[in-house]
Amino acid sequence: MSTVLPIDDDSYCIAMGRLLVMYTQIDYLIMCACAERIATAPNEEMKLMLGKQVGDESRHVRIQQEWMEKFGTDTTPVFTEQHQQRFLQHFRELNWLNFLTDMYVCVEALGSEAVEQIVPLADPGTRESLKTPLQDEIDHVAFGLGQLKIELAKLPHKQRMEYIESISSRLDFLDDALNDMGVDIPAMFQAVGADYRQVVDIVLERRGEILQELSMLQAA
Ligand SMILES: [Fe+2]
Ligand SMILES: [Fe+2]
């Protein structure tokens, strides 16, 4: 499967290559941010889950690196060293509740939703390389959202509802950060044939579902 290189379209290969490099860099950064969190995670169960995730993300990076090598991808980083440090610093400064929101709602749930939209457009080798990572992301999201619900349930009703409302604006940090870095995400998606507007709509729909799921908590 991975030897299939069906594409004689250079521009597709370059464009998909950029997305693969970006996805791999994000997995790597998630791995680092989760590893840093282990020491201060609130309990042993969470420490163990974060440790498992660190292992999963490390495997994703390895799978992607091996595929990019076969795919002949130019591995010039999309994110500079400075961008990477800023990402890690952002997560370092968050309290546990905000860490759960930014990591699992913004990056994991909505990020993998965006990657899912690319899968049908991808060549067979790229699709295969995304299979294990996307499967694991489902576990990470389930863990993160589960923990987020536990934390939210501890808040008084009013505070909880205010926090849930604020999540939409927390999501903007990622968008702003990417813009600041000069990474043109719409162009990267469009270059592989994705309808970016549609991708955004699907991601926003998923965000709406998550927020609704979280607000149901107050009725419980
Ligand atoms: Fe991953
Ligand atoms: Fe993940």
Image: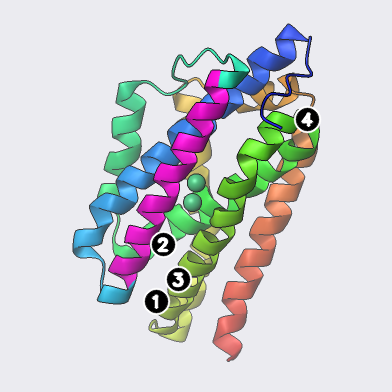
**The residue tagged with tag 2: helix, strand or loop?**
helix
Q: Amino acid at mark 4?
A: Ala
* 206 left or right of 59 in image: right
Query: Mark 3 vs mark 4: which is more N-terminal?
Result: 3
Q: Is residue 176 visible?
A: no
How far apart, in angstroms, are the residues tagged by discs 2 and 4? Answer: 29 Å
CB contact under 8 Å: marks 2 and 1: yes
Residue in view at x 62 percent, y 81 percent: 216
Structural distance between the alpha carbons of marks 2 and 1:
9 Å
**Relative image position of residue 105 (x, y in whole percent):** 52, 57
| Residue with the mark numbered 4 | 194
Question: How dense is the environment of label 3, judged by Cα within 10 Å: few (below 14), some, or many (20 and up)?
Answer: many
Three-letter amino acid code at disc 1?
Answer: Glu
Residue ID for mark 2: 100
Which segment did they paint magenta? Answer: 46-69
Query: Residue 47: where, in percent of width, then height?
Result: 28, 67
Q: Is residue 54 visible?
A: yes
Disc 3, disc 2: CB below 8 Å? Answer: yes
What label sits on residue 151 in the rendered view? 1
Which sits in the foreground, 179 or 105?
Answer: 105
**Which image quarter: residue 217?**
bottom right
Question: How far across and how far down the image is residue 196, in percent?
Answer: 75, 32
